[in-house]
Image (cartoon, rainbow, N blue to C red):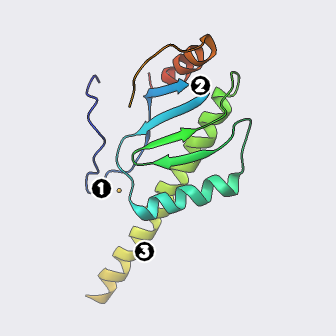
Amino acid sequence: MADETEATQEPDETPRLDWSSAQVSDGTLTVKLSAKPSKPWKGVFDRTVTLLGGGDWDEVELKSAAVKVTGVQEGVEGSLRQFLEGAVQEANATLASDEDEDREGQNEGEGEDAEGDEDDGDSRMTERFREFGA
C-alpha cells in the first residue's frame, strides 16, 4: 500500500501496528498505527507498557497514531516486536471487553518519514522491522 495518508479511526476499527511503515533513525523506531487510538486505548496501552517493563531499549511512547521507541539496538527486533504487539493486543482486548460489557448493560436496560543519512545499523533494523509487515 503506497498510501501514506494519516491514520483515521473508523467506528469499529482497532489500532494495529503497521510494520511496513517502520523506520529506525538514530536508534529510534517509529511504527505507525493503522488507526488513530482513542484516549482510553492510549491509557491501556501506556499502562500495559509500564506493567510489561522494558527490554533492551529505552522509552516506549505513543504519539498521535504512531509508537516511538528510543534506544533500539541491533538484535532486539524480534523481542521488541513481540513486546509492542502484546501491548497493542492488550489495549484492543481490554477495550473490546469493555465495549461488550457496555452493550450488555444497554441491552439489559432496554476503535514524518524523511529519509536522510542513516548509519548502517539503523538501515538494517528498519529493513528487519518492515519485513514484519510483509
Label pair 1/2, CB-CB below 8 angstroms: no
Q: Is residue 84 above or below residue 73?
A: below
Label pair 3/1, CB-CB below 8 angstroms: no
Query: How many discs mark residues in the rendered view?
Result: 3
In the picture, residue 12 is in which quadrant? bottom left
Pointer 2: what residue? 26
Residue visible at 55% across and 54% down in the picture: 90
Of labels 3 and 1, earlier in sequence is 1
Residue type for callout 1: Asp
- Mark 1 and mark 2: span between their CA atoms? 35 Å
Which class describes the residues within 10 Å of circle 2: few (<14), some (14-19), or many (20+)?
some
Residue visible at 45% across and 59% down in the picture: 41
Left or right, residue 55 beside residue 118: right
Of labels 3 and 2, earlier in sequence is 2
- Judged by depth in the image, the label closer to the viewer, 3 or 2, is 2
The disc at residue 101 is: 3
Which class describes the residues within 10 Å of circle 3: few (<14), some (14-19), or many (20+)?
few
Q: Is residue 47 above or below residue 34?
A: below
Element under disc 2: loop
Residue type for callout 2: Asp
Q: Position of residue 134 (x, y in %)?
A: 44, 21
In the picture, residue 39 is in which quadrant? bottom left
